[in-house]
Image (cartoon, rainbow, N blue to C red):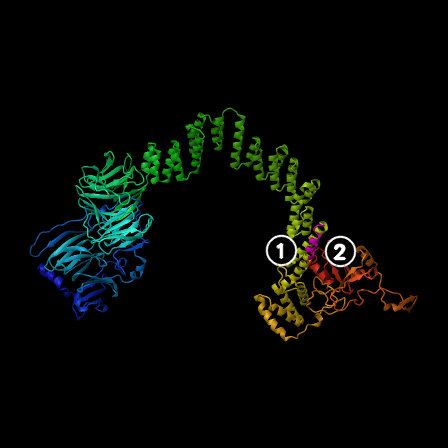
């Protein structure tokens, strides 16, 4: 009956109720519900997979190639919810693909360095097939048990990774994956939507059953090949679970376990347990392990980087050594190497492939060889598969490890089951026996100097031997693995019974709880393999360090501390070493805790030892003082005869009572020193007045003055200054400095006078701006002239008192400096577009040059040229100031006529180089605008044409273009009212004169008003030879009336109440007025003929009509006569600029000074 039920179960799967949904054209051979029971997948005879919902409605139809020739015999849904973590999207044909994944987000175990390599992975099978329970229908044999693989208690390793970013899209979809196996001998994977994942996997048999492990990590499949095979979750075959005598029709995996049951054609039911062993390798900071049975992950335990090597075959063995990685697959061995020698490099590449099948228990890789271990035999093969050496041992090999060496000459440490421990060199055919013990070897490790050997035997005992003497040094129970510290010769650790044991030298063992196997020990990190994961445990080395300290073995304790202890442990080590007078160790320890105070102490002691000091008690006394053991330090100081150090220590600590007790008998010197120290303490205790009194009592005047001065106690300070002798210059100078700082210049002056320090007194007055006192000192002591007048001049210049500043510079003899200051101010004003200030500064410069020319005969010509140039620049900048304000500001205070005249005047004077800052464009633009406004259309058109040849700013371009067009619609002539007339020859002149500001007829220069720039009715005249300035002024002041010839024919006579007219024949010869007479030269001549007057003409002039520019020497006076006496003209007595009187009065009222030279109105002439 059992056979019959099995036949029904396996061969008649179509009798389920789920087939009652409807009729089908083809019989379904396989069906499976999804994990959530919402969908049913049906595999059809014609090779079609139909996915339907619970109502029987077909949602997805998958048509596979092959059709009815490839019927779907078995299908299965992956039970895992995380299929997107492992299912590949595309797979290449390269079986050795290396995928560097340095950003795996899982937490990593950290291993610094270890000598462990290929221990556990070399002692277990890759895949063990065990506990097969076979029940046959006819024979009825009993259960047979076959167990192979790893020994009991050996660790197994598996790992899971977080999802990579490129699976994020798939993760959001439905998580059911359908595995489909057909009799076209293909295995495929599909999503619920019908989309195929990956490529088809080719089989070598007709599959009859497919079953997933409960977590979806493996697939069990059976069929016509009469065996059940194990596959990875993505369809890579790993191996055979069990072979049967007939077809395998069904297979099932027990949930949440590794048990598999098979059902066969002949009625046999077979039951298997699968054991997955750990395959891994470790070398220093690189740990390699098998993942998903077909991949190898190499993890850098320092940088936490990982690299995945996809082999796509069953990984049987892993070995790693330095830059080599060996992976054994079923039919070959792959040798990888790092791209570079960088310790953090994680890029591996294929170096060699050994395409041979090997059977071995252990695999070891070296720089140029691989070592295969099979039972008692060791074989050394090159990377080209050439067997170079072979060693045959007397017993089974239980442990093998590479202990380093030159490339091609590495050494191996081999442990045998009979207890023998051998050392083998790759280039030596003979093995060297290190020692032999009576118990079997389970684990081995050699110290860094290769002088000690640690062995764990089969009785879990850790034995440590001296390799040279073969002597057993010590042994410890309860050990399953052991490792020497790679940074400390005398330290090892071993694990067992849930404890980690650390042993240093011959000291007792220090224990702490730890689960797992110790595989490496580097510094303070212990590498532990627990269950499936490798971890790095940070273990403080405090306990062994204190064991060394108890025996005052400071250097050994320091070596232990370097492996990793807390800051408090470092401080304890430093303190103990310092008290033990081991200054070298103490210095290193204090450097670790960055205690500069103790480092300074040690450095001072070392310097003293270099100078020959050797008193250890004195050194120890200093140490006690630094540690706060003051009484012990004082006793040692006294014993060494250095009571002064003890006294200084007490006073520095403000222990004045102890200091007095220590001093004992009254000693004036020590008493004064104590008083000074107590004053220091009072000062630091914020009792400054008491501290100052104590300093004065102790004779420390400077410290007392500092305290009093800092607190501003002027009364106490002046008392001290008056009591001090004048020979005590330093305290007196400090008193004066504090008086000066506290703004008590009177007291400071008194103190400096007492000292007789005249230079300091001068500096005091200068700094306080007490110029009168400074000048009085200079009058008595001329050597301080520069110290007073130079800062005085600078102060005046800073306060815009340039005239006084110039005088001060002159008095100091610093004329060049005065000129430089003004030139710099002028340049700054021009650059900053302060043209009014620039004009004023240029006028100041011109007057400065005139003063220099008057005083320095050698530089007279040079200075006069500069005078004329600066006067000209001053006038230009004064005029351009109005143009600049008109073009840059929205409103202007000037009338159009004024701007018109200013623009014309400026253009007449810009015939040569244009000064810095003055824009010809702005000038022409203003002239064009005002000319158009006032009706001077011809001049406006000329200005616009000139602007066409210049670079015009964009803000003027539109207005200029518009004005240039509109002015052409105006008549081509200028308003006659604007035409200037020469007051000497009455000739009308053009608005723009190519000859400049002179008459085109008589060449008489025009005189302009400095405000409106209209032509003034003034004519310059010159004195006849022999007439001096004083005489000319006196003649003009006589004001003898001039008789008009025409008016002289009739003379009015009055007598009493009658009036009469007398006819005069005019026979008397009267000199002709040169201003009213006709010009003696030809009209339009090229030479200018100035007006020269004689004494008689001077006498006939009215004082009101004559304006005189009284230039200082070496310039001559200039004389001007007004031809229109009714026009009131005013001349500034300082800059000699001419103004209409009304304009001048208005400007003076506005500015309270001359608008040109800024002379105040209340300043005398």
Sort mark 2 into few (<14), some (14-19) or many (20+) by Cα contacts within 10 Å. few
Q: CA distance from mark 1 to mark 2?
A: 30 Å
From this viewpoint, which residue is outermost toward the left?
Answer: 138
Of the pair 242 and 75, the residue shown nearer to us:
242
Q: Quick check: can you spot residue 591?
A: yes
Q: In this rendering, which labeled residue sits more in front, label 1 or label 2?
A: 2
Task: Indicate the quadrant where residue 1004 lies.
Answer: bottom right
Q: Position of residue 240 (x, y in %)?
A: 17, 55
| Residue 1009 falls left or right of residue 1063 | left
Q: Secondary structure at mark 2?
A: loop
Where disc 1 sits, the SS reads: helix
Please tell me the numbered disc located at residue 827: 1
Q: Is residue 889 visible?
A: no
Q: Name the disc covering residue 1116, or none.
A: 2
Residue 995: x %, y % from top left: 69, 66
Q: Which label sits on residue 103?
A: none
Residue 1051 image point, x, y percent? 89, 67
Q: Is the N terminus in the top left, top right, bottom left or bottom right quadrant?
A: bottom left
| Residues drawn in magenta | 857-868
The vertical placement of 866 against 373, above or below, is: below
Picture quadrant of residue 93? bottom left
């Amino acid at each position: 009956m059992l056979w019959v039920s099995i036949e029904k179960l396996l061969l008649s799967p179509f009798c389920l109720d789920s087939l009652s949904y409807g009729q089908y054209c083809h019989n379904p051979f396989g069906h499976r519900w999804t994990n959530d029971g919402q969908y049913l997948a049906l595999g059809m005879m014609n090779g079609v997979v139909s996915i339907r919902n619970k109502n029987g409605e077909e949602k997805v139809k998958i048509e596979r190639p092959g059709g009815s020739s490839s019927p779907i015999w078995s299908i299965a849904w992956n039970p895992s919810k995380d299929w997107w973590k492992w299912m590949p999207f595309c797979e290449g044909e390269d079986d050795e693909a290396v995928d560097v994944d340095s950003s795996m987000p899982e937490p990593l175990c950290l291993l610094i360095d270890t000598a462990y390599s290929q221990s556990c992975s070399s002692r277990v099978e890759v895949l063990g097939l065990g506990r097969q329970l076979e029940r046959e229908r006819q024979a009825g044999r009993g259960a047979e048990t076959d167990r192979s693989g790893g020994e009991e208690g050996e660790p197994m390793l598996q790992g899971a990774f977080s999802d990579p970013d490129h699976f994020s899209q798939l993760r959001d979809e439905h998580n059911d994956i359908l595995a489909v196996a057909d009799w076209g001998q293909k295995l495929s994977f599909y999503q619920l939507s019908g989309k195929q994942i990956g490529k088809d996997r080719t089989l070598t048999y007709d599959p009859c059953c497919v079953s997933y492990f409960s977590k979806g990590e493996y697939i069990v499949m059976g069929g016509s090949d009469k065996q059940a095979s194990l596959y990875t979750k993505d369809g890579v075959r790993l191996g055979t679970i069990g072979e049967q005598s007939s077809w395998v029709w069904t297979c099932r995996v027990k949930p949440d376990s590794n048990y598999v049951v098979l059902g066969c054609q002949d009625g046999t039911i077979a039951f298997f347990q699968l054991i997955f062993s750990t395959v891994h390798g470790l070398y220093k900071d690189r740990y390699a392990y098998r993942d998903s049975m077909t991949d190898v992950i190499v993890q850098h335990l320092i940088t936490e980087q990982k690299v995945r090597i996809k082999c796509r075959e069953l990984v049987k063995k892993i070995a790693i050594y330095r830059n080599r990685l060996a992976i054994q697959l079923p039919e070959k061995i792959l040798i990888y190497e790092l791209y570079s020698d960088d310790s953090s490099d994680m890029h591996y590449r294929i170096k060699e492939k050994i395409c041979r099948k090997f059977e071995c228990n252990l695999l070891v890789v070296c720089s140029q060889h691989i070592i295969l271990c099979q039972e008692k035999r060791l074989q050394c093969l090159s990377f080209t598969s050439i067997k170079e050496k072979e060693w045959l041992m007397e017993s089974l090999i239980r442990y093998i490890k590479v202990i380093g060496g030159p490339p091609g000459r590495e050494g191996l440490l081999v442990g045998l089951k009979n207890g023998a421990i051998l050392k083998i060199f790759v280039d030596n055919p003979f093995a060297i026996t290190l020692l032999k013990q009576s118990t079997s070897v389970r684990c081995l490790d050699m110290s860094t100097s290769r002088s000690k050997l640690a062995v764990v035997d089969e009785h879990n005992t850790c034995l440590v031997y001296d390799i040279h003497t073969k002597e057993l040094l010590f042994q410890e129970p309860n050990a399953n693995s052991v490792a020497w510290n790679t940074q400390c010769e005398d330290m090892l650790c071993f694990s067992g019974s849930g404890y980690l044991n650390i042993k240093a030298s011959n000291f007792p063992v220090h224990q702490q709880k730890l689960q797992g196997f110790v595989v490496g020990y580097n510094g303070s990190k212990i590498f532990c393999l627990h269950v499936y994961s490798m971890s790095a445990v940070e273990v403080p080395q405090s306990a062994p360090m204190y064991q060394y300290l108890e025996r005052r073995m400071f250097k050994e304790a320091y070596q232990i501390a370097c492996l990793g202890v807390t800051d408090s442990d470092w401080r304890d080590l430093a303190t103990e070493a310092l008290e033990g007078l081991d200054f070298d160790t103490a210095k290193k320890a204090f450097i670790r805790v960055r205690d500069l105070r103790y480092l300074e102490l040690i450095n001072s002691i070392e310097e003293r030892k270099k100078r020959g000091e050797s008193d250890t008690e004195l050194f120890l006394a200093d140490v006690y003082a630094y540690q706060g053991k003051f009484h012990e330090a004082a006793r040692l100081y006294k014993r060494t005869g250095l009571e002064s150090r003890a006294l200084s220590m007490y006073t520095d600590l403000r222990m004045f009572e102890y200091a007095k007790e220590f001093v004992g008998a009254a000693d004036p010197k020590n008493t004064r020193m104590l008083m000074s120290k107590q004053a220091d303490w009072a000062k630091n205790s914020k009792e400054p007045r008491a501290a100052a009194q104590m300093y004065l009592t102790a004779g420390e005047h400077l410290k007392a003055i500092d305290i009093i001065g800092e607190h501003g106690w002027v009364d106490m300070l002046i008392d001290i200054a008056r009591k001090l002798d004048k020979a005590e210059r330093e305290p007196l100078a400090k008193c004066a400095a504090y008086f000066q700082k506290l703004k008590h210049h009177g007291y400071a002056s008194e103190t400096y006078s007492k000292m007789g320090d005249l230079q300091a007194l001068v500096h005091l007055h200068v700094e306080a701006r007490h110029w009168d006192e400074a000048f009085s000192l200079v009058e008595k002591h001329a050597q301080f002239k520069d110290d007073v007048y130079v800062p005085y001049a600078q102060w005046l210049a800073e306060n815009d008192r340039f005239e006084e500043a110039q005088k001060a510079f002159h008095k100091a003899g610093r004329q060049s400096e005065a000129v430089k200051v003004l030139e710099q101010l002028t340049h700054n004003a021009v650059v900053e577009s302060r043209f009014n200030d620039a004009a004023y500064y240029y006028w100041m410069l011109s007057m400065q040059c005139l003063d220099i020319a008057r005083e320095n005969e050698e530089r007279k010509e040079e200075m006069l040229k500069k005078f004329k140039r600066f006067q000209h620049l001053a006038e230009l900048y004064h005029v351009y100031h109005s143009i600049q304000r008109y073009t840059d500001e929205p409103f202007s205070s000037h009338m159009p006529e004024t701007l018109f005249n200013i623009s014309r005047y400026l253009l007449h004077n810009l015939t040569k180089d244009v000064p810095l800052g003055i824009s010809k464009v702005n000038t022409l633009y203003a002239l064009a605008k005002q000319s158009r406004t006032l009706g001077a259309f011809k001049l406006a058109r000329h200005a616009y044409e000139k602007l066409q040849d210049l670079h015009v700013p964009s803000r003027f371009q539109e207005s200029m273009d518009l004005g240039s067009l509109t002015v052409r619609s105006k008549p081509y002539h200028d308003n006659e009212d604007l035409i200037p007339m020469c007051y000497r020859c009455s000739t009308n002149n053009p608005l723009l004169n190519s000859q400049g500001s002179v008459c085109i007829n008589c060449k008489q220069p025009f005189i302009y008003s400095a405000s409106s720039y209209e032509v003034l009715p003034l004519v310059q005249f010159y004195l006849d030879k022999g007439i001096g300035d004083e005489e000319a002024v006196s003649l003009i002041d006589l004001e003898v009336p001039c008789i008009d010839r025409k008016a002289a024919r009739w003379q009015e006579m009055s007598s009493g109440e009658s009036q009469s007219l007398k006819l005069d024949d005019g026979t008397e010869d009267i000199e002709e007025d040169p201003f009213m007479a006709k010009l003696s030269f030809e009209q339009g001549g090229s030479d200018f003929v100035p007006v020269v007057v004689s004494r008689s003409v001077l006498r006939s002039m009215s004082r009101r009509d004559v304006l005189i520019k009284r230039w200082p020497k070496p310039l001559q006076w200039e004389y001007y006569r007004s031809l229109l006496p009714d026009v009131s003209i005013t001349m500034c007595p300082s800059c000699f600029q001419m103004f209409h009187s009304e304009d001048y009065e208005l400007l003076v009222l506005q500015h309270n000074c001359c608008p040109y030279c800024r002379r105040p109105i209340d300043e005398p002439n």
